[in-house]
């Protein structure tokens, strides 16, 4: 199925290139239809967004991230800090955000929607110039997600976060 879907995706991309489609010129209605189609494909074939096996050479980076998460878990996931979701939830995420960050606003909206479906607690950490926790764990891109067993840099679409929550990959 995945190989067939990849072939279909490649054919679609090739036809769009030949047609010289300009996705920035789509009307709001065309954009909504396009987004709905992409969402339907991802929901019907979640393996597309599934985590890939770790490439060789990243083992040290993963170990470093896991050590940082373990060393700072209490500060990252402290339920008394600002956030949302059930306090005793089985799944935890620490989210680092900053001012004037539209991706951060989208991340919060996505996670709030997921918190209404999943048993999760999101602790929100605002970045400040002297945020020692952010410095200690290496926050370098916003938004920055920390699960108990992984870090994700940059905005993740809700469907990707849902996949991690469903498979408990980051837990």
Image (tube, grey):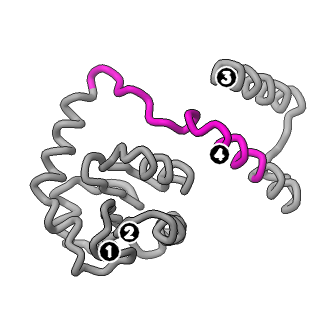
Q: Earlier in the sequence, mark 2 or mark 4?
A: 4
Which residue is found at the position 39% from the left and 26% from the top?
Answer: 53
Q: Disc 1 marks which residue?
A: 126
Q: Earlier in the sequence, mark 3 or mark 4?
A: 3
What is the distance, in whole Å, between disc 2 and disc 1 at their CAs? 5 Å
2 and 3 marks in contact (CB < 8 Å)? no
Helix, strand or loop status at disc 3: loop
> Which quarter of the figure is the N terminus placed in?
top right
Q: Is residue 46 magenta?
A: yes
Look at the numbered discs 2 and 4 and tell me whether their residues touch, using CB distance below 8 Å: no
- Examine the rendering and report whether any part of residue 45 can be seen: yes
Query: To which residue does mark 3 refer?
Result: 1
Q: Separation of disc 2 and disc 4 at Cα? A: 27 Å
Q: CA distance from mark 1 to mark 4?
A: 32 Å
Q: Is residue 24 left or right of residue 106?
A: right
Residue 97, which numbered label? Answer: 2
């Amino acid at each position: 199925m995945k190989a067939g879907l990849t072939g279909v995706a490649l054919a679609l991309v090739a036809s769009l290139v030949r047609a010289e489609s300009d996705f920035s010129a789509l009307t709001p209605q065309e954009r909504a239809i396009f987004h709905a189609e992409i969402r339907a494909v991802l929901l019907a074939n979640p393996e597309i967004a599934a985590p890939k096996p770790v490439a060789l050479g990243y083992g040290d980076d993963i170990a470093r991230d896991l050590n940082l998460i373990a060393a700072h878990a209490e500060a990252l996931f402290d339920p008394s800090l600002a956030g949302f979701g059930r306090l005793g939830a089985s799944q935890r995420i620490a989210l680092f955000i900053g001012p004037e960050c539209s991706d951060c606003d989208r991340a919060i909206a996505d996670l709030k929607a997921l918190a209404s479906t999943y048993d999760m607690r999101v602790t929100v950490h605002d970045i400040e110039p002297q945020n020692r926790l952010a410095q200690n764990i290496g926050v370098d891109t916003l938004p920055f997600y920390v699960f108990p067993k992984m870090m994700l840099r940059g905005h993740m679409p809700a469907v990707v976060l849902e996949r991690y929550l469903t498979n408990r990959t980051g837990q």
